[in-house]
Image (tube, rainbow, N blue to C red):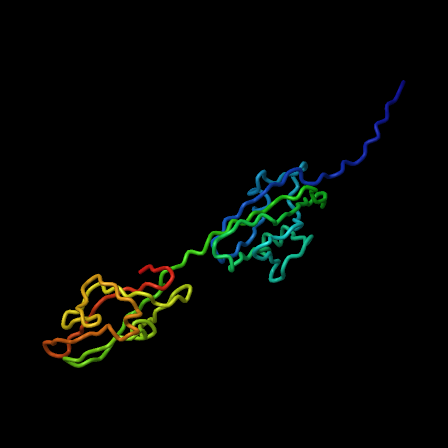
Amino acid sequence: MGVITLSISARTNQPPSSSGWLSIPLDYNSTHVFTLANFTTETTPAYSDPEDDALESIKITSLPVQGQLLKGVTPVSLNDVITSAELTAGDLTYVSDDTDTDGYSDGFMEFLVSDVGSSTFTTSPKIVTFVVSSNVNQPPSQVGDGELDITVGETVTFTRAMLTTGLNPAYSDPESDIALNLLIETVPLFGNLYLDGVLVVDGQIIPFTSIDSSLLTYVNISLEDGNNDEKFSFKIADSVSGEL
């Protein structure tokens, strides 16, 4: 009787068989916190492994030209390894370049992946591209109310401070842009607003340069009992966005 002997060796666990590229859209001056899904289910093609082993870690083989890649608070260096646990904890972040207000696309970040079975990295780096939008200047974020104590028949000359820092809450702008124009929505009832001696009407836009030149005044005509509140409503546009 013949015997065939089969010599069986242990199978070597294989590294991941697939890992793809990733594009991340970002607003101007924003930060992206990487997730485990960014390097597995969200890549094109998605991460896969011959033995269905989970992703163990990634290795950074190329760094973005613009912005900064951080592991915690420390800048990432070439060939730094970030584990799946660190990705899950949100330890890997990308901070966009806030000096580029025109927006940009940076595709210089490259990475390799390893699985928990083989702990072996793939050999073909994949790319993460950051697509950062341009800076859209925002209108004023806060314009409060003002209050003045005057007597019947008094004339008031408005200043920039009265209509910005003197408001409650004070005028503020996301980019710290100064006030550019004042829109008079509705004029007062018991007196008149004048711009360089000319009557101001509803919907009129008044440059703050004119206010700086002491050209915007309010002249009280009369009040029935001296205790009525006089009001006019307004909006402010900043010097860059121009939006009211």
In the rendered structure, the answer to whether residue 106 lies left or right of residue 101 reads right
Q: Is residue 217 left or right of residue 56?
A: left
Q: Which image quadrant: the N terminus? A: top right
User: In x, y percent, where is residue 165?
Assistant: 34, 74
Q: In percent of the image, x 51 and y 57: which residue is there?
A: 100
Where residue 155 appears, as percent x and y from the top left, is 19, 78
Q: Position of residue 15 (x, y in %)?
A: 70, 40
Determine the residue located farthest toward the bottom in the rendered image. Answer: 151
Q: Quadrant of the C terminus?
A: bottom left
Tell me the quarter of the picture where residue 223 sits.
bottom left
**Horizontal relation, residue 58 to residue 223: left or right:** right
- The answer to whether 120 appears left or right of 155 in the picture is right
In this rendering, the answer to whether 128 lies above or below 216 is above
Residue 241's spot in the image, x, y percent?
Answer: 37, 59
Furthest residue in direction top, as rendered: 1
Q: Which residue is farthest left?
A: 224
Specify the quadrant of the image occupied by residue 191.
Answer: bottom left
Q: In terms of depth relative to the viewer, which is nearer, 128 or 7?
A: 128
